[in-house]
């Protein structure tokens, strides 16, 4: 577990870690009524959630879990569970309104499964 390796974390200050966590939280949909609640936008979501990549939602969700941010990780996992297709895959990209493509690739399925 690289996050717990002292040599790798030696130069990271608590203020730097808080800045990174704040950015990740700013990129997550916190509106519990939104269909994309829990998703992390791949691009800072000032104009809405238009670029949601399931594999990256999983990676950020896992990172949040490793950093002790359980609620954010659970919300990401619930989003992934809601957006999984009937065939078990995830579309390569979604927006706040749903899939933007029918294309699916293995990495967009493997990484969400690792979080779930």
Image: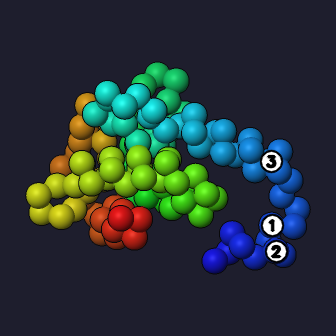
Direction left: furthest residue: 86
Q: What residue is shown at x 30% (from left), y 65% (from top)?
A: 109
Residues tagged 1 and 3 counted as in contact (Cβ below 8 A): no
For residue 16, the mark is 3
Mark 2, secondary structure of its residue: helix
Residues tagged 2 and 1 counted as in contact (Cβ below 8 A): yes
The one of 102 and 57 positioned closer to us in this rendering: 57
Judge whether residue 70 can be spotted in this image: yes
Q: Mark 3 or 2 closer to N-term?
A: 2
For residue 9, the mark is 1
Q: What residue is shown at x 75% (from left), y 76% (from top)?
A: 5
The one of 59 and 75 positioned closer to us in this rendering: 75
Q: Which residue is mark 2?
A: 6
Q: Can you say which quadrant of the picture contains the N terminus?
A: bottom right
Q: Mark 1 or 3 closer to N-term?
A: 1
* x, y percent for residue 91: 25, 52
Mark 3, secondary structure of its residue: helix
Mark 3 neighbour density, 10 Å: few (under 14) some (14–19) many (20 or more): few
Viewed as shown, does residue 7 lie left or right of 27?
A: right
Mark 2 neighbour density, 10 Å: few (under 14) some (14–19) many (20 or more): few
Q: What residue is shown at x 18% (from left), y 49% (from top)?
A: 102
Viewed as shown, does residue 57 lie left or right of 89?
A: right
Locate residue 23: give its quadrant.
Answer: top right
Measure the alpha-carbon separation of dots 3 and 2. 16 Å
Locate residue 26: give its quadrant.
Answer: top right
The one of 57 and 47 positioned closer to us in this rendering: 57
Instruction: Report how many numbered discs are placed on residues in the image.
Output: 3
């Amino acid at each position: 577990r690289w996050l717990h390796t002292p040599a790798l974390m030696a130069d990271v200050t608590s203020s730097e870690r808080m800045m990174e966590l704040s950015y990740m939280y700013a990129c997550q949909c916190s509106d519990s009524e939104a269909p994309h609640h829990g998703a992390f936008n791949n691009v800072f979501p000032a104009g809405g959630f238009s670029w949601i990549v399931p594999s990256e939602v999983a990676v950020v969700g896992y990172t949040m879990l490793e950093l002790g941010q359980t609620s954010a990780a659970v919300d990401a996992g619930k989003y992934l569970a809601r957006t999984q297709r009937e065939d078990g895959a995830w579309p390569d990209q979604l927006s706040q309104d749903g899939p933007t493509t029918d294309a699916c690739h293995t990495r967009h399925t493997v990484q969400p499964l690792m979080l779930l």
